[in-house]
Amino acid sequence: MPANINHKRSKADVLLEEGALNQAPEKVRDPKFQEGGFFDPRDAVQVKYEMLRRVSVEKAPVTDVSDEYGVSRPTYYQARANFEEAGIAGLAPKKRGPHGPHKIQSEVLAFLEARLAPGEPIRARELAKAIQQEFGVDVHPRTIERAVGGKKTAK
């Protein structure tokens, strides 16, 4: 029996892995979050939701609530916009940065595919140089490999 089956991860570990660990739980001064139990100042999604609820339901001023929850007013308004757009899911952290090979658009991809021979090595370094010469765009060789299927040889 593997040793990790009985290993239970802590809530803080899970929050950290999911990117939802509040980096400044000590700034949350709402008394509900100081009691322990249900309200957890380490849970960034829960903190944001309760902050939004306080303004929306209890009609507390944004300035007071943002101070009490340890965030700036722009952070409050961003959380509200995210919540209005996507509900609770909008409060969950999103991966930052580009999603996918953003430098390799259709024209560059067509250029790559025209230079690939099925079963032959991809030669990503050479292709990166060719892309630089043709389009003036610096592309990492690994980005090229991912864009054409992640293999070392062409399909």
Image (spheres, rainbow, N blue to C red):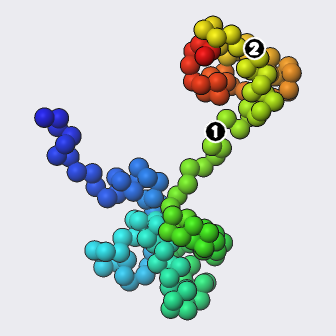
Disc 1 residue crowd, few under 14, some 14–19, many 20+, Cα 10 Å: few
Q: CA distance from mark 1 to mark 2?
A: 21 Å
How far across and down, in percent of the image, does residue 78 sit?
63, 69
Q: Is residue 129 left or right of residue 134?
A: left
63 or 145, nearer to the observer: 145
Quadrant placement of the N terminus? top left
Q: Looking at the image, which residue is at 85% across and 26% down?
A: 135
**Residue 85, which numbered label?**
none
At label 1, which amino acid type do we have? Gly
Quadrant of residue 132 in the image?
Answer: top right
Please name which of the two marks, 1 or 2, marks the residue nearer to the observer. Answer: 2
| 15 over 130 or under it: above or below | below
Quadrant placement of the C terminus? top right
Q: Which residue sits furthest left?
A: 1
Q: Is residue 21 left or right of residue 107?
A: left
What residue sits right under mark 2 in the picture? 115
Q: Check disc 1 and report its element: helix, strand or loop.
A: loop
How far across and down, in percent of the image, does residue 149 sit?
59, 25
Residue 72: tell me if it is visible.
no
Earlier sequence position, callout 1 versus callout 2: 1
How far across and down, in percent of the image, does residue 30 sit?
43, 81
At label 2, which amino acid type do we have? Arg
Quadrant of residue 77 in the image?
Answer: bottom right
What residue sits right under mark 1 in the picture? 100
Q: Is residue 114 left or right of residue 26?
A: right
